[in-house]
């Protein structure tokens, strides 16, 4: 699909949870966003502190973040309504967005939003 779109268009793809894995996520073409389900108890991490310099490799993951289930139950994170087109109809979904988290299943170089 990506090859059939104009170069400046973004392609957003919604997939079944079985496609939300390292193999698929690490091979996404440029300007492609994948929306998929992960486990409610998945371990998420904040981005590492950029000011931490020391011997050894650069840190890839920061402190542990709340799980998707904890985010869902957190009343301080507001629900947002988004609209999506499917089967010729517009559907409204309620979502919570937490940006710039990392999930080991997405690979080291791909920050995620949940």
Image: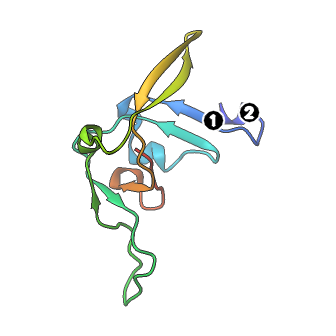
Residue bearing the label numbered 1: 11
Answer with left or right where residue 25 lies relative to residue 38. Answer: right
Tell me the residue at 50%/38% (across/down). 34
Residue at the outermost bottom position: 55
Residue bearing the label numbered 2: 5
Tell me the residue at 23%/44% (across/down). 70
Tell me the residue at 50%/28% (across/down). 82
The image shows residue 113, relative to residue 46, as above or below, that is above
Task: Work out which quarter of the rendered image holds the N terminus and state it.
Answer: top right
Tell me the residue at 42%/35% (across/down). 36
**Residue 107's image quarter?**
bottom left
Q: Position of residue 99 (x, y in %)?
A: 45, 51
Task: Work out which quarter of the rendered image holds the C terminus and state it.
Answer: top left
- Mark 1 or 2, nearer chain start: 2
Helix or strand or loop: what does disc 2 sit on?
Answer: loop
Circle 1 residues within 10 Å: few <14, some 14–19, many ≥20:
some
Which of 84/55 is in front?
84
Q: Position of residue 91 (x, y in %)?
A: 50, 16
**Residue 3's image quarter?**
top right
Colour style of the rendered protein structure: rainbow
Circle 2 residues within 10 Å: few <14, some 14–19, many ≥20:
few
The image shows residue 79, relative to residue 114, as above or below, that is above
- The answer for how far apart the CA atoms under marks 1 and 2 are is 8 Å
| Numbered circle sitting on residue 70 | none
**Residue 39's image quarter?**
top left
Q: Position of residue 86 (x, y in %)?
A: 54, 15
Q: Position of residue 77 (x, y in %)?
A: 35, 43
Tags 1 and 2 touching, CB below 8 Å: yes
The image shows residue 14, relative to residue 40, as above or below, that is above
């Amino acid at each position: 699909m990506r090859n059939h779109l104009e170069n400046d268009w973004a392609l957003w793809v919604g997939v079944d949870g079985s496609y939300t894995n390292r193999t698929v996520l690490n091979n996404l073409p440029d300007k492609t966003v994948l929306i998929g389900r992960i486990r409610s108890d998945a371990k998420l991490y904040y981005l590492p502190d950029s000011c931490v310099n020391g011997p050894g490799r650069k840190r890839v993951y920061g402190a542990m973040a709340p799980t998707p289930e904890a985010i869902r139950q957190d009343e301080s994170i507001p629900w947002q309504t988004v609209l999506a087109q499917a089967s010729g109809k517009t559907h409204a979904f309620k979502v919570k967005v937490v940006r710039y988290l990392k999930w080991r299943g997405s690979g080291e170089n791909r920050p995620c939003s949940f």
